[in-house]
Image (cartoon, coloured by chain):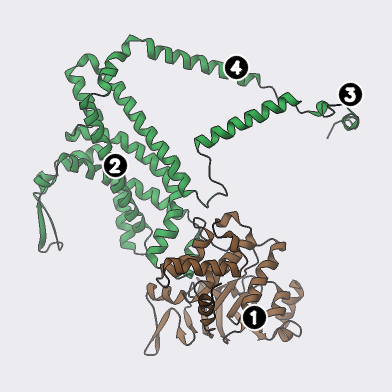
Chain colours: A green, B brown
Amino acid sequence: MSEPPGATVVLAEAPPTDEPSRPRTAQRVLPLRRPGRWIVTAVVLVLVAQFAHGLVTNPFYQWDRWSYWFLRPTILDGLLITVEVTAYSAVLGLVGGIVLALGRLSKSPVLRAASWTYVWALRSIPLIVVLIFLYNFSALYKTLSVGIPFGPAFFSFDESRLAGDMVVAVIGLSLNEAAYAAEVVRGGILSVDQGQHEAAAALGLPKGYQFRRIVFPQALRSIIPNYVNQLIGLIKGTSLVFYVSLLDLFGSAQTMGSTYPGDIVPLLLVVTVWYLILTSVVSVVQFYVERHYARGATRSLPPTPLQKLRTGLYDLRARIRREAAV
Amino acid sequence: MTADTLEALADVEAATVEVHDVHKWYGAHRVLDGVDLTVRPGEVTVVLGPSGSGKSTLLRVINHLEKPEIGYVSINGELIGVKRQGDRLKELSERAILTQRGRIGFVFQNFNLFPHLTVLDNVAAAPVATGRLGKPEARQLARELLDRVGLAGKTGAYPRQLSGGQQQRVAIARALALRPGVILFDEPTSALDPELVGEVLAVIEDLATSGTTLVIVTHEIGFAREIADRVVFIDGGKIVEQGPPSEVLDRPRHERTRDFLSKVL
């Protein structure tokens, strides 16, 4: 240190004592002033205000038409389709992903190779190609049968009757989703400490119990954030089902847009707001699900927004009191 | 503790553990090189040896967490992880091995408690999962075992909210819930702060006096002297010498034992 030795002596000296009732005032640490931060904050606020002003006042957006369309039955029907397709595909995709992940982690080289190939293929083919391919599936295979490969069939389905548009959409999205979910789940399982596998084995817990109750719940901690990311992609990905003639949220807006060309912008805004709402709902659910699976992983759970607000107000009050006292 | 479960605990018969000419390789490296060992019922055996000598591997071979390439382990005469077919040994199914492990307690150096389960559920999990007890009975047993290791007040806590010494005591209760004939300890105090070692050793000592068969890998020489019926010194995958602590620790016959003891004492 290059400080002159006198500096410490000055600190050690008693502070000016014209106010003996507050002896600590002189040693109070003043927080660093940050003028740069205030300038940046001001600039950002101005930009946000300009954007909001434009959004409200620009006639281009036609907010009156927006409110006309926002809760129209056609739009709500489309929204329902979007939610349904997303929900089915998210669940089936996750189940498929778990199976594929277990395949990739299995000791059998055949299962490992099969899972790897599936993931490789489905991640390489664009979703839209998978969907249109499935849509034309009935032309490729007239019947679908369950039986011995190359041998007799036990059941058979008439393909054209089985595959409604909804079924095609869900199958296509699930096949695609499973490939991505497989990697998310595999990563989650690998993140569980080896000691957990050993402890479960040493206690003689049955294999299925080990996975369901010990390994998977811990893997979920890392699976959830990644899978929700995937899920949000899926919500928007469902807009592709328009191409297999399923009228989802986007599809309904698109159709209405070609009937009322003047309303295309407000219709797109309707769709945007609905997608924002869906994503927000998913994010809120994610917070609470993550919080649930955080039990035991941290010494105390992360606070809910309400708890944060409460402690925030409490801290603010404490700070004001402290300032007043000094 | 209710009289019933106390009796049920006392009911468990201490097991005989026999290790027959076990050889084990990791790749080209030979970790165990023909180990023979017999542990009599209720006996407390402490395994000592330098790092890398194969003592942990020996312990893990006993409950078949590691498969020996040659030789076998038997507990009360029952082969572990293998069966005899003519004059050959054949590996058992995974399910059968898991069932056998359900009778052998194992305590890890790093506790390996299940962090997402409460202390009570950690202890109650195995008896429920293996179908040996119903959930209420298993929880009752878990409460009594936690009381025995001095953690009656921590049943609802999660493992990471406990100190290392408390976690290791939960791990011991978890092993006891199997009602094991033998408990294996793999350096149970090595991951603990020095001031927490005593509470774990006290629990192990309590088990030793209650007549359970114990095999303990440890570096606590003083503790070994106090509770061991027999000390086994292992080096280079071989048992160098064994006997009562007064012999092996105080008058070691082998140069390597003397050398090791002079370093750790």
Q: Which residue is mark 1?
A: B209
Q: Which residue is mark 3?
A: A16
Residue A84 percent across, percent down from the top left: 25, 39
Mark-to-mark CA distance, 4 and 2: 45 Å
Residue A17 percent across, percent down from the top left: 89, 24
Q: Which residue is mark 4?
A: A39
Q: Are marks 1 and 2 on the same chain?
A: no
Outermost residue on the bottom side: it is: B87
**Which disc, if any, is residue A107?**
none
Q: In the image, A157: left or right of A73?
A: left
Which of the two labelled residues, at mark 3 and mark 4, occupies the earlier sequence position? 3
**What secondary structure is marked by label 3?**
loop
**What secondary structure is marked by label 4?**
helix
Mark-to-mark CA distance, 3 and 4: 36 Å
| Subunit under mark 2 | A
Kindly indicate whether the residue at mark 3 contacts the one at mark 2 (C-beta within 8 angstroms): no
Q: In the image, A1: left or right of B60?
A: right
Q: Quadrant of the N terminus of chain B?
A: bottom right
Check the image and report above or below for A139 versus B254.
above
| Subunit under mark 1 | B
Residue B174 percent across, percent down from the top left: 53, 68
**What amino acid type is highlighted by mark number 2?**
Ala
| Subunit under mark 3 | A
Rendered residue at 38%/49% (across/down): A183
Q: Which residue is mark 2?
A: A87
